[in-house]
Amino acid sequence: MATSARGRIDKRQAILDGAFAVFARLGYTQACVQDIADEAGVAKPTVYNHMTDKATLFRHAVEAASQAALDARIGALAPLADPGDDLAGALEDVAHALLRLHTDERSCALKRLLYSEITRFPDILDVVTGSGPHHLTQALADRLARLTLSGRLRATDPDLAAEQFLALLLGPLEARSRLGTRQIGDTELRDLARAAVCTFLRAWARDTP
């Protein structure tokens, strides 16, 4: 790739990262393009060269953050590709990683922006869900289907198994965190992961623990 093209891509990413940080910190109304330019380390005209206005920048920044969050969550499924002899341990590692990602600053900021700006940007829900839960569910279902084919699970419906695995994680997480308003420590996250996996395996393991 040509140096100029790479530089433009890098600047665009810096602008999107900077914009998300500023919007998360100040909200849409209080954020200004100069704040975003300063955060991104670029000149204000450079922001407008990449994005036509603040509203467009907001949508693209949220979309980029949502996609990055999804990529990280799908990446957290990697231990299921080769879980070895300890399937429960691999599932717990995945569950713990997913819980941490769902409670990290980016995810919390995305939730806050969605809640606070949904009336101003009613289409923002589509932007977020476009990189949202159904993609993670599909990716997890694919891993569970492979484990079924190898005889590790009896998930006759991998899509349902994936939905239930995530529900066992995220349902208690939302309750414990009071919809994201209470911080949860890592020990508690590990306990939630362990409990979810125990219940999941009782339903779907080839040999019930």
Image (cartoon, rainbow, N blue to C red):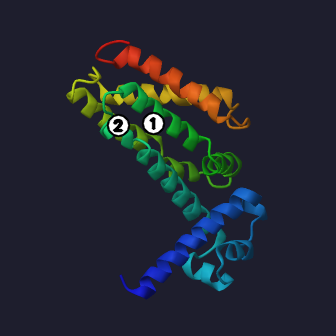
Q: Nearer the viewer, residue 63 or 155?
A: 155
Residue 79 at x, y percent in the picture = 37, 39
Residue 13 at x, y percent in the picture = 53, 70
Sequence-wise first label, 2 or 1: 2
Asked if one can make out residue 130 in the rendered structure from this viewpoint, the answer is no
In this figure, which residue is indicated by the disc labeled 1?
A: 94
Q: The N terminus appears in which quarter of the rendering?
A: bottom left
In this picture, residue 137 sits left or right of residue 170: left
The local crowd at label 2, few if under 14, some if 14 to 19, many if 20 or more residues have their Cα within 10 Å, is some
Three-letter code for the amino acid on which mark 2 is drawn: Leu
Say if 25 sits above or below 110 in the image: below
Q: Residue at x 69, y 47 (%)?
A: 112
The local crowd at label 1, few if under 14, some if 14 to 19, many if 20 or more residues have their Cα within 10 Å, is many
Q: Residue at x 51, y 40 (%)?
A: 97
Disc 2 to disc 1, C-alpha distance:
8 Å
In the picture as drawn, the residue positioned furthest to the top comes out as: 208
Say if 51 sits above or below 205 in the image: below
In this picture, residue 130 sits left or right of residue 99: left
- Contact? badges 2 and 1 (CB < 8 Å): yes
Q: Residue at x 44, y 27 (%)?
A: 165
Q: Secondary structure at mark 1?
A: helix
Residue 127 at x, y percent in the picture = 52, 53
Three-letter code for the amino acid on which mark 1 is drawn: Val
Q: To which quarter of the image does residue 170 belong?
A: top right
Q: To which quarter of the image does residue 180 belong?
A: top right
In this picture, residue 198 sits left or right of residue 62: left
Asked if one can make out residue 180 in the rendered structure from this viewpoint, the answer is yes
Q: Secondary structure at mark 2?
A: helix
In this figure, which residue is indicated by the disc labeled 2?
A: 80
